[in-house]
Image (cartoon, rainbow, N blue to C red):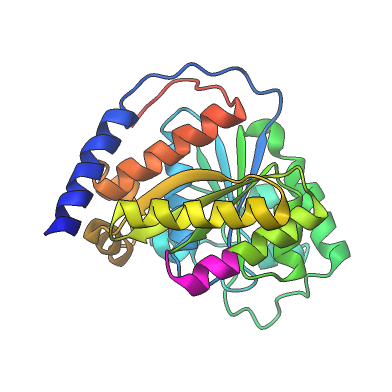
Amino acid sequence: MREQTAIVDQATRLREIALQNYTVQTATMPYRIAVTSGKGGVGKSTVALNLAIALCNFGQKVLLVDADANLGNLDVLLGIAPRYRLGHVLHGKVDIEDALVSSYPGLKILPGSSGDVDYPEMTTLVQQRFLQDLFSLEEHFDILLIDTSAGLSRETVTYSLESDEAIIVTSIEPTSVMDSYAVIKTISISRPSERISVLINAAQVPSDADETVQKLKMAVDHFLKRDIGYLGSIPFDVNMRNAVQAQEPVMKRFPTSAASLSLRVAAQTIINQSLIPVLGEHQ
């Protein structure tokens, strides 16, 4: 009963926060975000997709890239069957622009490949060429959102280091938190000034999520001598699971659910702290 009450209370608080008006300054160039995680199975891709939509609802033009190494699933979450995928781009068969699909106003997606037996090896040179081609499209977008693989592969770390901000999706489970710390440490060693934020997913009790992040922040401050941001927690919400099963984003299928409101607040926080202009909100 306490957990149910806590979730309802958080949903009410989020609804109030989400409906507030904000004033932000103007960004001078597109903002690059890597959505990553230390541990798989925490809902990273689901969060990335719905966060992209939440940003679009604030008037942002978003390019979402499914960069999960040959295990892309954003197309599955959307219930679409794209003609071209990241593998085709890496092979040089199509340009990135030709592989982009649109499934929501303001949002373009580069679908990832999954189980492609001919998927090219993502060497440093291949990845850098891909990033150069990707960045060449930035003038058409306000935000570039890269959904990376979980873990600490060279490829995943490079995406984070090439971004303005790394958002680490985690649960409150100790193993997930420890893996998140490892990601934070790796990024911090290579690029100490990069903004790193944490987003807790599927939190049964909001206070547990807040406590988990506070402990993580203390460890990061003590051992790494830096600070990390906190984008809040997404409560455990049956609507999220139902949306995934229906192959439709929760932000679209259940826009007033607790999960959607939490994602909306996270998107607004990103916009505020990044000085990204709000060009006009829509639903």
The quarter holding residue 273 reads top right
Residue 176 colored magenta? Answer: yes
Q: Position of residue 191 (x, y in %)?
A: 79, 50
Is 120 displayed left or right of 18 in the figure?
right
Q: Which residues are magenta?
A: 172-180
Q: Residue at x 52, y 61 (%)?
A: 82
Q: Residue at x 72, y 71 (%)?
A: 153
Query: Split into 4 quadrants, where in the image is the N terminus?
Result: bottom left
Residue 95 shows up from this direction:
no
Q: Position of residue 39 (x, y in %)?
A: 54, 71
Up-down relation of residue 20 to residue 196 (above or below): above
Q: Residue at x 29, y 67 (%)?
A: 245
Is 175 displayed left or right of 32 in the figure?
left
Q: Residue at x 60, y 46 (%)?
A: 228
Q: Position of residue 112 (x, y in %)?
A: 59, 64
Up-down relation of residue 167 to residue 56 (above or below): below
Q: Exactly how many numbered labels are in the figure?
A: 0
Residue 109 colored magenta? Answer: no
Query: Split into 4 quadrants, where in the image is the C terminus?
Result: top left
